Image: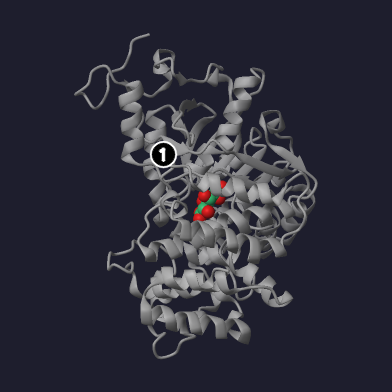
Amino acid sequence: MTRQTSPIGANASLTPLNEANLAQLNSQVSAPQYDRSRLKPRIVHVGVGGFHRSHEAFYTDELLRNDRSSDWGICGVGLREADEKIASVLKRQDYLYTLIIRHPNGTVESRVIGSIVDFLLGCHDPESVIEQMASPDTQIVSLTITEGGYNIDAATGEFNWNHPDAQHDLQNPTTPKLVFGFLTEALKRRRARNLPAFTIQSCDNIQHNGDLTRKTVLGFARKQDPELATWIESNVCFPNAMVDRITPVTTQDDMDYLVQEHQLCDEWPVTCEPFCQWVVEDHFSAGRPAWESVGAQFVPDVGPYEKMKLRLLNAGHSVLGILGSIHGHRTIDGCVGDPLFATYLRQFMDAEVTPVLDEVEGIDLETYKDTLLERFGNPNIKDALSRICLESSSKLPVFLIPTIQDNLARGGRIELATLVIAAWCFYSDKQVDQHGNPLEIIDELKQPLHQAAAATRKDPLSFLEVTEVFGDLIQNERFTKQYVSMVETLYETTDIASIMEDLLQ
Ligand code: CS2
């Protein structure tokens, strides 16, 4: 086997990552030893971002390494033009990539993941994606389409049918744009061909992610073909799941690391923490890989696990992300290295979140929270606050606002979470930190949020009028009183740290 030369050219000893070069990788890089040519695309995965590559694809790779008789491979799917880059990189690398697992003590594991075996782009060729989903090989279609991908209006809790892509999909079912259009058309073809249904497995950070996916797919199907909807109702399983692994955005440093340490040229590796968790309800329409043999937990009811993770970890990230951005911090480990932020986060978890959580079997909440602080503090995971704040308008209604609502209903504490909403108003309005440095805001609702926030001086409640994010929070007097006093102080002093200090007990 000849070693292919690097496209970088300057360093002839670099090994580009691809199937032919796997046998020649530096021995410190753990490469798949299983025969990838016999894998079948039994899983079609929509949304091949860093998280899918550090989580489901990792679990599946681990399974393939342990069980050479398994043939569960993954066909990745991207639906947006923005997915062209990952499509071409993965294709050039025979769908291989390196997972760089960074431990807090500085140990780094580099491991090539081999479980992805194909990639299709729905925006260029919807037919091939629909046919792949409809293929007899496909047993599971899994999704990481982000919280916003479910297109839920917080004011109604329902799918937003006014979205132009939803309208497009209803009118053009064979050339859909939204994942729900693809799923509906593929299931329609399976039913017509007498093929069994696949499982639809959401891997997004949403409470009851499977139930929500089910509701939306059924809604899509019902509008097109009520009989298909009935068939889906009795044939397709939508297991709820809690997914967890902190996966920062890949940086040039990650690529440079592989070049310097292992002379390996990977155009798009993924970095992640060592911690990894997947808790899934065991309802599958057509079988599943034995993921439990590689650490996934199958439980009858994932609800308490999801709630614990979303309300503590994800909300904890948002607390640090928004307050920290205004203060001038750049990363999560930078925030928890600041005692004020670490104390604030812990008090938020203890005083506002823990009282609204349910018992979680086998988990001691105090230990869970301690572990979260350790994970956030991993100095080798430079998780940028800009990633955390990305699309806050679809995250906060899932991670943080329900905790405020629960506490309003039970007379619990709301101050620490309310400051995050007040700070988010300031952040959306000013778009700079308190030192005047610009904040990079990426949010589908950036403009409406900015406009609403910018009217705060005239009407202190204007930000809360974005009801698709805040629902009916504006109606609650206890909340609005607290919120207005915080917004006023923040606009007057612009000193987030001193407001945080005053709230600590
Ligand atoms: C983060 C998550 O998106 C966010 O704001 O909280 O991506 C988080 O890192 C993962 O859910 C960890 O499992």
What amino acid type is highlighted by mark number 1? Ala
Residue located at (76% from left, 51% from top): 360
- Residue 321: x, y in percent? 45, 59
Please state if 249 lies on the left or on the right of 420 as rendered.
Answer: left
Q: Quadrant of the C terminus?
A: bottom right
Residue located at (60% from left, 45% from top): 371
> What residue is disc 1 on?
87
Camera sees residue 441: no
In the rendered image, the residue lying farthest to the left is 10
Can you say whether 202 is above or below 449 in the image? above
Residue located at (38% from left, 24% from top): 17
Can you say whether 488 is above or below 276 in the image? below
Can you say whether 483 is above or below 64 in the image? below
Task: Classify mark 1 as within 8 Å of ligand 1 or not, answering yes or no.
Answer: no
In the rendered image, the residue lying farthest to the bottom is 458
In the rendered image, the residue lying farthest to the top is 1
Q: Quadrant of residue 312?
A: bottom right
Which of 139/458 is in front?
A: 458
